[in-house]
Image: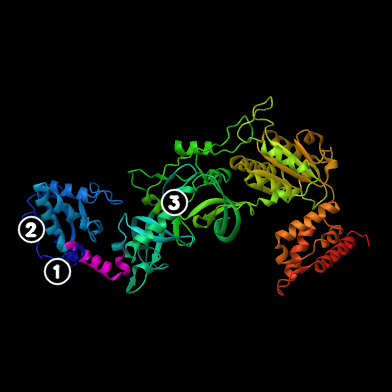
Amino acid sequence: MSSTDAAIALVIPKEEPSSVVTKLYQQGFVHWSQFDSEEDHQVALEKQMTQMPIVHRFIHCGTSWITESFTINSPFMRKILLEVLENYQDLDLECENWTFRSPYIPLVHRWQRLQDFCQSTSNPELSKAGQQLIEFLLPIVGPSVNSLEQTRLTGKVQFDFLWQIFPPGELVMTKMYGQDAICRVLKHHKVEESYSCPAYWVIDMEYVDWNGDKCGYTTMKTKIGGYDGYRRAHLLPTWPISFDCDPDAIKAKMIARGRQFEELRTYHFMQYEGRKIVTRGNAKEEEPASGRVVVDAFAYYASCKVVKPNLRPLDSEEKPKADESSEDEDGYKVRRPRRRSDASTSSSSSEEEAAIDELKLTVKSSETKLERKEDLTPLTDEQCLLCTPWVNGFDLKAKEWGLFLVEKMKDIVWNDDAFSNLVLPGDEKELAWSFIDNKNFANSDFDDFVTDKGRGIIILMFGPPGVGKTYTAEAVAEKGRVPLYAMSAGALGTKPNEVEASLDRALELCRLWNAMLLLDEADVFLSARKEDTLARNELVSIFLTKLEYYQGILFLTTNRASSLDHAFQSRVDLFLPYSDLTTTARRQVWQNFIERAGGETRFKVAEEDYDQLAELRLNGREIKNLIKSARLLNMKSGQPVTTARLAQLAEKRITAMEMLNGEV
């Protein structure tokens, strides 16, 4: 007979063993006593009761007596219960004075363990006490045990008895921002119906997360609303995976995802296609994301000035505190990191204060830079099983932090043709790459007289628009296999404090990621300072100061090199001048973009036709947009784009630009 069948077939006796149980019946307020003091009476009664192994208390309910509580005094029974109920969340038998009250949840959840212990112990005194304890408990907890086993057999559970299927330590399937995740139950409680809210259950759980330094356990909560009758367990918003027809398959899938999470713990530059969760004010919003993402929780907590969550160590014996979380809009609660400004200096622990000090971002050599101290200890299968499906990442296209799905992360497929397709005159293309290729980000043999000063590489690209300045930075970063943090100068802000904060953030992230920084249209920071432009002069001064201590590679673009500030000229390591594309260069640009857009399968352009197209006075950006427009116009027909169509669009654009510029 299986353990389940045995539990279902429990024979519940009507009487407990009288030799070990003393019964107390509540008889109201009038009673006779041999003591003239109520206090003396209570002391004598308690002394008498502590001499009995079990004290069983009853209250009158209708026409019968029901159990109000019972207290275990037997040292052998207490030893058994300490073993059986070890690590049961929020249960302190000493504080409870070894007294149990309905519905006896810990005893129901650990009933099988109690039986196993009593059958396996070789100590005769413990064995005898265990059998007496089981005989006493059967009439009290037996109905609940049978109900639980019936629930497991049918897979259906009533709302009021949800506590039965969520014992501490139970593995459950839940949702984190709509994504399946496995958590471990810590505890649960029922919120009774009120005037404004129907009854619901709250399940406290824990899972494994990464805070940029280490992995550990953090907590979340989920709600289960009320319902009538029975409901299948696996249809609940959170349900034990033991109710699934193949829990081992679920575990294998989640462990595999956990291994992916384990690989993403430190800094990674990845390709992503999926959804992301971003914070907008006090709300979290879901958005589609496509492109390249930097996965880096360490940089997230640093750049966003957020105190790292204090995760419970994976090997800790300490019981987790399941109430240090806040409710999320999805109906469950997650531990939220606090911003540093929210931390109270009067109540912060020394550990938290140290974390805040460590997180301070700096760019000057006189201040300590943030450095990684990551514990990459391998995770066990059980820990991988509990890993969150989300990681902190930075969307390079949107320039914002968010949560990204582990399963959607892919290795980057680098475009090796980007650099070879770059059209630059003379040897400037190879010269630009030589600067990058020979730059050692971590160490340099050359330094300024001031430590850490002047160790970066600054490349200024100037010339008319659409001639390849931005594309040069993109191609070089692609060839170098590093992130390109590209931003417009206008995105830095207009006020000095905004500009300084934005620059600090961008420069520090590039340092942490070994990334290249592209500051497009940086004219406002590069133009010569004048006495009547004090506000702009301050911006230029801030920009120059930041560049002094930047140790990475910075690309700058401008269309007005003639107004360059003299102080900035001396800081540039490489000038790359760009002029309007020559006929030969335009021919190459046409060929490159057409080939990239589909080549002969989507375009019908003969070799000699490229000479005709090259005569059209267009820059690289205009050529790219024309090819895109032509593809859109011919998409419905499915016919290849002809030279005539390209020439038609080009002529219309040239005419329009001449009219806009007042040339016609």
* Mark 3 vs 1, N-terminal side: 1
Task: Name the residue furthest left.
Answer: 19
Label 3, label 1: how far apart the Cα atoms are = 58 Å
Where 97 sits versus 604, above or below? above
Query: Camera-side residue: 82 or 259?
Result: 259
Marks 2, 1: nearer the viewer: 2
The residue where tag 2 is placed is 17
Q: Amino acid at mark 1?
A: Ser
Q: Amino acid at mark 3?
A: Arg
Q: Position of residue 588 (x, y in %)?
A: 79, 54
Marks 3, 2: nearer the viewer: 3
Q: Indicate left or right for 307 with 621 as reference.
A: left
* Residue 309 appears in the picture as rendered: yes
* Mark 2 vs 1, N-terminal side: 2
Asked if disc 3 and disc 2 are in contact, CB closer than 8 Å, the reply is no
Label 3, label 2: how far apart the Cα atoms are = 53 Å
Q: Position of residue 149 (x, y in %)?
A: 24, 66
Q: Indicate left or right for 581 with 268 as reference.
A: right
Query: Camera-side residue: 419 or 496?
Result: 419
* Mark 3 vs 2, N-terminal side: 2
Task: Name the residue furthest top.
Answer: 449
Q: Read off the magenta span.
A: 140-162
The residue where tag 3 is placed is 259
